[in-house]
Image (cartoon, coloured by chain):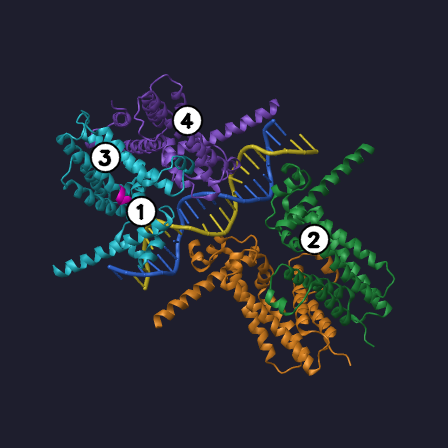
Chain colours: A purple, B cyan, C orange, D green, E blue, F yellow
Amino acid sequence: MEKRSRKEEERIRRRNHILDAAEQIISDVGFESTTIDQIAERAEVGKGTLYLHFKSKSSIYVAICERGSAMLNERMARVLTRDMKGLDMVKEIGNTYLRFVRENPQYFYAFNYYEGILADDEVRSSDIAEKCEENAREGMTYIVRALQVGMQDGSIDDSYDPNQLGVMIWGASRGVISIAFLKQQGHHKKILESADIDLDTLIGGFIQLVGSGISRRD
Amino acid sequence: MEKRSRKEEERIRRRNHILDAAEQIISDVGFESTTIDQIAERAEVGKGTLYLHFKSKSSIYVAICERGSAMLNERMARVLTRDMKGLDMVKEIGNTYLRFVRENPQYFYAFNYYEGILADDEVRSSDIAEKCEENAREGMTYIVRALQVGMQDGSIDDSYDPNQLGVMIWGASRGVISIAFLKQQGHHKKILESADIDLDTLIGGFIQLVGSGISRRD
Amino acid sequence: MEKRSRKEEERIRRRNHILDAAEQIISDVGFESTTIDQIAERAEVGKGTLYLHFKSKSSIYVAICERGSAMLNERMARVLTRDMKGLDMVKEIGNTYLRFVRENPQYFYAFNYYEGILADDEVRSSDIAEKCEENAREGMTYIVRALQVGMQDGSIDDSYDPNQLGVMIWGASRGVISIAFLKQQGHHKKILESADIDLDTLIGGFIQLVGSGISRRD
Amino acid sequence: MEKRSRKEEERIRRRNHILDAAEQIISDVGFESTTIDQIAERAEVGKGTLYLHFKSKSSIYVAICERGSAMLNERMARVLTRDMKGLDMVKEIGNTYLRFVRENPQYFYAFNYYEGILADDEVRSSDIAEKCEENAREGMTYIVRALQVGMQDGSIDDSYDPNQLGVMIWGASRGVISIAFLKQQGHHKKILESADIDLDTLIGGFIQLVGSGISRRD
DNA sequence: GATGAATGAGCATTCATTCAT
DNA sequence: AATGAATGAATGCTCATTCAT
C-alpha cells in the first residue's frame, strides 16, 4: 500500500505541476493565446505528457477553474464559522473574495473564461466540469447562508429572497472586480482614472453600498 | 463637394453593411468561431473589400463595440432630459441598459469581448478604439450626472463620491446582467435554477438593491 | 464569357497540377506515407491552396481514382468499337488493362487503396466518389458487353451469366496484375522468380487461361 | 533442460496470446487504426511487454501473417493427401482457400496489408518476414503440385507451365475473393448488386471457370 | 475600388517507441 | 522479466491577411 500511495501522490504532484505551469502561461499571455506547446515547455514536460493527465486543452482550463473554485470555497467557508452578525459575514465574504482574486488573479480570468469553454459538449459532461459546477453552487451557498444568518439575527432586511439576493451579490461582485481588474491592465483608463479609484477603495465602497442596501432599517 | 459627399456616404453605408453582417454572424456562432470568410459572404462583398474598410478582424470587433456603445449612449442621454428625481434617473438608466442588452445581446457580448482584443497594441492605439474608450467614458458620465442630480435633489445619499459610485454601479450592472445571460445559455444551471430567477426579476431586484443602498435615509 | 472560361480553365489546370504532384509523390513513397506537405511542396503551391481545391487528403486520393478510372474507361470503350469476335474483345480489353497499368502504375495503387478511403462517410457521399463509383460501373459494363457480344457471335460459352462472369474476370485480373506488381517491387521473390515469370508472360498466360475457360467448345 | 523448456513454452504461449489480441482488435477496428495501446490492453499485458516479444508494430503484423499462412498451408497440404484427380485437387484447394478466408477473414486482410509493410527494410530482413515468404512459397507449391498431378493423370491440359499456371491461379483467386469481400463491406454496390452475386456463387463460378480453362480437351 | 485565389504560420492531438524502476 | 509514464516527431487542417488582376 505504501508504494501505491507513493505512486498516486506522484501523479497528483505532476498534475498540479502542469496546472501551475498552465496558470503561469495564462497569466502572462491570456487564455486565448496560450498554446499547448507553451504549457508543456513551461512545465518542462513533453507535450504528450499533458495528454496523459488531461484529455484536451479545454479540460486543462476546466481543471484550473476547479482548483481555483475549491480554494476560494475553502476560504469562504471559514468566514461562516466566525462569530459575527450576518451582515458582517456578507461583507467579510466580499473581502475574502477580493483578497483571493488579488492574490490569485489567474483564477479570476479562469472563472470568466470558464463559460466559453463549456460550449464543447465533451468537456461539459466531464467529471471535472461537474465538480466545477458543484464548487460554484457551493460558493453561492456560502453567500446565501450568510444572508440567512443576517436575516435571522436582524442585521439584514428580510424582505428579500435570500437566494435571489445571493445571485445578485455574486454577479455584482464579479462585475465590480472585473472593472477593477480592467483598470489594473490599463483599460478604460480615462473613466477609471477620472474617478481616482484604486481596487481597495472601489471594492470597499461596493461592499458598503451592498451592505447599506441590504441592511435592515429601523 | 457634392460628389465627394456622395462617395463618402456610400463608403459609410458599405461600412455599416459589413458591420451588420458581422453582428449577425457573431449572434449565430459566437465571437470566437466567427471567420472573415463568413462575414464577407454574409455581407456579400469580397474578402479583400473587408480589408479596405477595416485594418484587421479585431478592428471589426472594435467597430462593433463603438457602434453599440454609441447607440447605448444615445438612449441613456435621453433619460437625463426627463423630469424626475435623480434616484429615479439612476434606476431608469439601469432599466434602459437592461432593455438595450435584451434587444441587442450581440453588443453585450461585444463589450465583454472587447477588453480581450485590446491586448493587441496595434488595435489599442487605433482611432476607433480611441472612440470606443470615449464612448465608455461618456456613458459613465451619464450615470454620474444622474447621481449628482440625485445628491442635489436629496434623493441620493451624498456621502458617496459620485464618480466612484458611478463606477461601482456600472461594474455591478455588467456583472448581474452577465449572470442573467449565462442563465439564458443554460450555464450554472444548478445555481440559477435553485434561485428560481428570470432576467427581469433579477435585474429588477438589483436595481431596487442599489436604489436602496444609495437612497438618502432620514 | 471569354474571361469566365479562362478562369475556369485555369482552375482545372491548377487542380490537375495538384493531382499530378500527388500522383508523383504516391508513386515515390506509397499512399500511406504521403503527406499533405509533400504534395504541396511537389506541386509548388501553399498547403492552403490544396484545400481550396480538395476538401481533405482523402478527397485528393478519390480524385486520383476518378481521373485514372476515366482514362481507363476511355481506352476500354475504344475496344468495343473494333471489328472482332467477342472473345477477342475480352482478350483485348485485358491487354488494354495491362498496358494501362504498366504505363500508369500509380493508378493501379490508387484503385487498390480506394476502398480503404471510403470508410470515411464524408468522402463516401461526395460527388467525386459518386463519379468514381460510376466509372467503376461503366468499366465493368465494357467487359460485360464484350462477353455478350461473344455469346452472341458464338465465340464465348453462353452458359455463363455475363454479369457474374464479368465480375469474376474483373476481380481475377486485378489479382493477377497485383501479383505481377508485387514482383516488380521485389516481393515474393522466391515464389515469382522460381516460376521465372515476367509481367507480360504472366498476364498473357492469364488472358489465354480465361479465354480458354470461356470459349465455346464444339 | 526441463526448466528451460518450461520457460520457452511459456514464452510462446505469451507470444501467441498477444497475437490473438492483436487479431481481435484488427478484426474490430481494421489494420490502419489499430494502436499498440489497444493490443496491449486486450492482451492484458503492459505496453512494454509487447516490445519484449516483437521489435515493432509492423513485426506484429508480419507475425500474424506468418501464423495465418502456416494455418492455411496446413489445410492445403491435407488436400494433396487425398485420392482424387489433379483437376479436382486444384478445385478443392480453391474451396479450401475460400473456407479459410471465410472463417478467418482477419488473415485475408493481413495478407493484403502485408505487402505494404515490407516497404520498411528493417522488417523486410527480419527472421519472421523470411518465414512468411517461405510460407507463401510453400503454399504456392501445393497448387503447383496439384497441377502437376493433374497434368500427369490427364485431367489438366499439360501445355501450360505448371509454375506459371500456379501463380496465375493464386493471384486470380486473391483478386476474386477480394472483390467478394468488398461486396460484404458494401463497396462497389452498384456493380456487384447488379450482378446479383454472393460469395459462394462468385467463387464457385470462378473455380469452374479456371477448371474449365485448364482441363484437358479431347 | 473590388476581388478572391494563394499563402503558410500556427494549432491541437496522436501514437510508436523508450527506459527507469 | 514486466511495466507504463514520458516523449516529441509527425500530421491534417484552419484562417487572417496579402496582392495581382
**Residue range highlighted in magenta:** B98-106
Q: Nearer the viewer, mark 4 or mark 2?
A: 4
- Badge 3 marks a residue whose secondary structure is helix
Quadrant of image for the N terminus of chain D: top right
Q: Chain of mark 3?
A: A
What residue would you read off at disc 3?
Answer: A189
* Mark 3 burial class by Cα count in 10 Å: few <14, some 14-19, many 20+: some
Q: Residues within 10 Å of mark 1 (few under 14, many from 20)?
A: many
Magenta-colored segment: predominant secondary structure: helix
**How far separated are the C-alphas under marks 4 and 2?**
59 Å
x then y, percent, for residue C10: 40, 66
Mark 2 and mark 3: span between their CA atoms? 72 Å
Query: Which of A218/C84 is in front?
Result: A218
Could you tell me how far apart the alpha carbons at marks 3 and 1 are, in whole angstroms?
Answer: 24 Å
Indicate which disc residue B106 carries: 1
Q: Amino acid at mark 3?
A: Lys
